[in-house]
Image (cartoon, grey):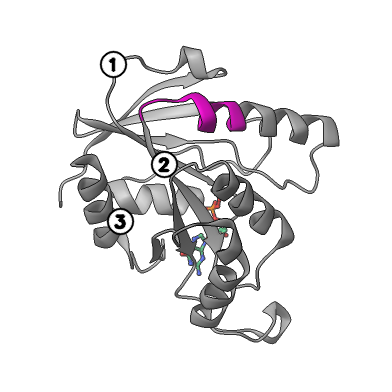
Amino acid sequence: AQIVQAEFIKSSVRTEACPSDGLPEFALVGRSNVGKSSLLNSIVRRKKLALTSKKPGKTQCINHFRVNDSWYLVDLPGYGYASAPQELRTDWNKFTKDYFLNRSTLVSVFLLIDASIPAKKIDLEYASWLGQNQVPMTLIFTKCDKRKKKKNGGKRPEENVNEFQELIRDFFETAPPWIMTSGVTNQGRDEMLLHMAQLRNY
Ligand code: GDP
């Protein structure tokens, strides 16, 4: 699981418009600023593959990247933009929820959670929705290289990770798999690639 060659295939605004070649896919979703672009770029080791703009509007689509010509990484619209109008936020929800429930080639949703801060309500809501709807999910904790800071609750990433899992436990029959990552140090990159390879071979 070393060379990762990826190419952008298309942006879709509806589930039905997504690629129809049947290749398995993994979807990355998380709060705006969680480190999704950094993680995507760390996985494929290519700068600027993902849309790195943090402005809502640039990333409102389902973006398919084909990896090694055999599977997809899917970049989904972020959630929780403080500045987005409520109306828009609701739309994103409907749109991504439809994708989660109806995309038959979706192997697992990678829910990105910032490990440098305590659990956020919106992340817990997202995780519980996925759990209750039995959408296969992997928890990807980001920014695990960050040191504890008083203003961030004064906890180490490991503590935040444990707490998050504890808080969502009741929504899952079996605890979802989880991986600690960093787009800065590339921690978790190989583990993610291995995890995806294992899931594809089921
Ligand atoms: P996105 O909005 O989810 O795509 O987030 P970005 O990848 O653009 O990252 C948001 C901010 O967090 C940027 O300032 C990044 O430099 C920072 N960041 C992203 N990933 C990491 C990480 O793994 N470790 C640290 N320390 N900072 C990160």
How far across and down, in percent of the image, does residue 85 sit? 84, 35
- Residue indicated by mark 2: 48
- How far is disc 3 from disc 1 in space, using C-alphas? 23 Å
The quarter of the picture where the C terminus appears is top left
Q: Look at the numbered disc 1 and give the secondary structure of its residue.
A: loop
Query: Dots 3 and 2: beta carbons under 8 Å?
Result: no
- Residue indicated by mark 1: 21
Question: Which label belongs to residue 77?
Answer: none
Q: Look at the numbered disc 2 and give the secondary structure of its residue.
A: loop
- Give the mark nearest the N terminus, 1 or 2: 1
- Magenta stretch: includes residue 189: no
Q: Residue flagged by tag 2: what amino acid is it?
A: Lys
Question: Which label belongs to residue 192?
Answer: 3
Query: Neighbour class for label 3 at 10 Å: few (<14), some, many (≥20)?
Result: many
The residue located at (37%, 48%) in the rendering is 41
- How far is disc 3 from disc 2 in space, using C-alphas? 20 Å
Viewer-proximal residue, 55 or 142? 142
The extreme right residue here reads 86
Residue stretch in magenta:
96-105
| Whether residue 179 can be seen here | yes
The residue located at (54%, 82%) in the rendering is 159
Total labels: the figure holds: 3
Q: Residue flagged by tag 3: what amino acid is it?
A: Met
Q: Quadrant of residue 50?
A: top left
How far across and down, in percent of the image, does residue 192 sit? 30, 56
Query: Neighbour class for label 2 at 10 Å: few (<14), some, many (≥20)?
Result: few
